[in-house]
Image (tube, grey):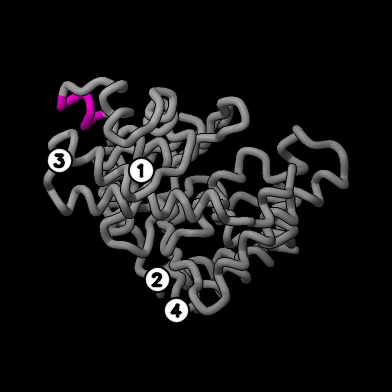
Amino acid sequence: MNGSAQQGNRASTVLGRKLGGELLRLRDASGKTQQQAAHVISATNSKIVKMERGWVPMRDPDIRVLCEFYGQDDQKAISRLLDLARLDRERRKAKGWWQHSPSAGGLAEYIAMEDVASRVRTWQLSLIPGLFQTAEYARSLAVSDGVWEDPDEIERIVDVRMRRQARLGGEKPLEVYAVVWEAALRQQVGGPAVMKRQLEHLLELAKLPHVRLQVMPFQSGGHPCVASSFNVVSFADAKAVDVVHVDTITSTVWVENEGEAGTYSSFFDRTARQSLAPTDSASLIDSISKGMSP
């Protein structure tokens, strides 16, 4: 599923779709119609459609009334829906810089999620995680992509990547747990000099208290996450559901189902356990860096 979907001048969000899907599931299970649901919150049928498709932010009173009408009396489940609604409203109201940056492109929805997240777990097969990239490395990636030829556009793309990294600082920095395959460290993006500086930058970031960096070495052989890279985005409230972001060559996929998101988390944890400990990972990164000939 794409990160956002348009309906007129309304945009659905990942969190909005998740919440709307939960309400739709409850309504179907209760046997109620959209017309009945609309009546109970003194709204129109179209509003229920918009709510169930994640096109509009939802009010807490409407959610409570609908849950009662649908027979949902599990207070923990209701609380979780209210948390989703709050996070979605915060995300929609955020006047983040990415909203005014055309170069953010398909990454804008992910950056918005990252901006309200408390933790990100990222598994990378072939690239240094975006939050850890140097400007030179990011620029080399943009050039090698072949999609952008305008130097100014490439610089705007690099700027987007660099501005994202502000989340690694501040009073409440984003907690990042990254596991990277050894191939990403050895692939000489931009040449050995660029890569050497990138690896040195990684070592500096790994010293931050809110950053945990591990390397999956070649010698580990097969592992659970050999198929693709992904990010698991978590939020401060323990009841908020994780969301998984997976980039493919042609599209972005959001895993919004709690069960499937849990599977990704489990696979990440299993892969992390097979990886080198942070100190050993740092030693390997340092060794690879020293072997890079400028």
Residue 29 magenta-drawn? yes
Is mark 4 in CB contact (under 8 Å) with mark 3?
Answer: no
Residue 225 higher or lower than 205, as above or below = above
Q: Which residue is mark 3?
A: 72
- The quadrant of the image that shows the C terminus is bottom right
Say which of 101 and 44 sits in front.
Answer: 44
Which label's residue is closer to the chain start, 4 or 1? 4
Q: Judge left or right: residue 135 versus residue 167.
A: right
Alpha carbons under labels 4 and 1: distance apart? 26 Å
Q: Judge left or right: residue 41 versus residue 290.
A: left
Image location of residue 218, percent across then percent down: 42, 51
Label 3: state its secondary structure: loop
Residue 209 got which mark?
4
At horizontal 57% and vertical 33% (from top left) the residue drawn is 10
Label 3: few (<14), some or many (≥20) within 10 Å? some
Q: Which residue is mark 2?
A: 278
Alpha carbons under labels 4 and 3: distance apart? 42 Å
At horizontal 18% and vertical 35% (from top left) the residue drawn is 69
